[in-house]
Amino acid sequence: MAEPLSSSQDAPNPPAQEQRVHVTNTHGENLVGVLHHTGSNKVVVLCHGFTASKDDGIILDLAAAITKHGLSVFRFDFSGNGESEGEFQYGNYRKEADDLHSVVSYLHREKYDVAAILGHSKGGNVVVLYASIYNDVPMVVNLSGRFNLEKGVEERLGKEFMDRINKEGYIDATNKSGKVLYRVTKESLMERLNTDMHVASLSISKECRFFTIHGSADEIIPVEDAYEFAKLIRNHKLRVIEGANHCYTAHRKELSDAVVECITSNEERDTPP
């Protein structure tokens, strides 16, 4: 059983011990993660966003903030990302939810108590989808996830993207200099367009405590998306961080404080968002 969490800023916990961990997903692919073990068996799993990794700055900052409060943290690369095996795929929400389930199952086998799962950006969508499929975590934190997955595609793939992909079967996404960043197949595009956050949100158990955090100045996913999650998820609290962009560049401490407050709160002493 985990030790009680200390909320005192004046008495920080000892530094967490880091351990590289390999988890095999249901496709036989090796997922690479890092366990920050504080001595507590309560662990928070952190999920990165699109084309990011477990070493993304926002993930590292959250890991440091959470472990200071006594919880252990597990951060990992989804298949096809970072150090993990597999081919990178656009879309891929269901497979990433399955990757997360492999991680949660591994932690349960190792006698860890998964206190919460947190996802940033696309990772936010993954944890929403996860909670709608697997009813095995008590708390979810959706950090800047997109509600309507039909939006944002044209910005990445250009106008007439459906005509192009129907004709060619794929689209190569490029940067401003023309370098190919990744290939979008018709199958992966349709997987994204057919992933319904409305249906997923309604499928989340009311026993699961759900938090959405979003920046009011998010330039990639508008804050209005956060309000859509808030309308549908039953046991939900919303926190909007004023002035914060998608990566909380100038608001990292405020973000970390909000996440720690969510994760270390309980029903008796919840504070309004």
Image (tube, rainbow, N blue to C red):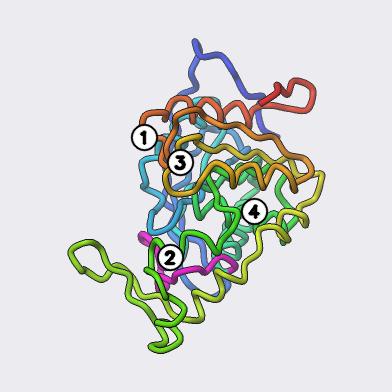
* Residue holding disc 4: 128
> Which tag, 3 or 1, sits closer to the chain's start?
3
Element assignment for label 3:
loop
Which amino acid type corresponds to the residue marked 4 in the rendered image? Val
* Residue holding disc 2: 154
Q: Nearer the viewer, mark 4 or mark 2?
A: 2
Which amino acid type corresponds to the residue marked 3 in the rendered image? Asp
Element assignment for label 2:
helix
Element assignment for label 1:
loop
Which amino acid type corresponds to the residue marked 1 in the rendered image? Thr
The segment highlighted magenta reads: 80-94
Query: Which residue corresponds to the image point at 66% horizontal and 58% vertical from the top-left?
Result: 197
Q: Is residue 259 left or right of residue 75?
A: right
Q: Is residue 131 visible?
A: yes
Q: Nearer the viewer, mark 1 or mark 2?
A: 2
* Residue holding disc 1: 249
How far is disc 1 from disc 2 in space, using C-alphas? 25 Å
Q: Nearer the viewer, mark 2 or mark 3?
A: 2
* Residue holding disc 3: 218
Q: Is residue 141 magenta?
A: no
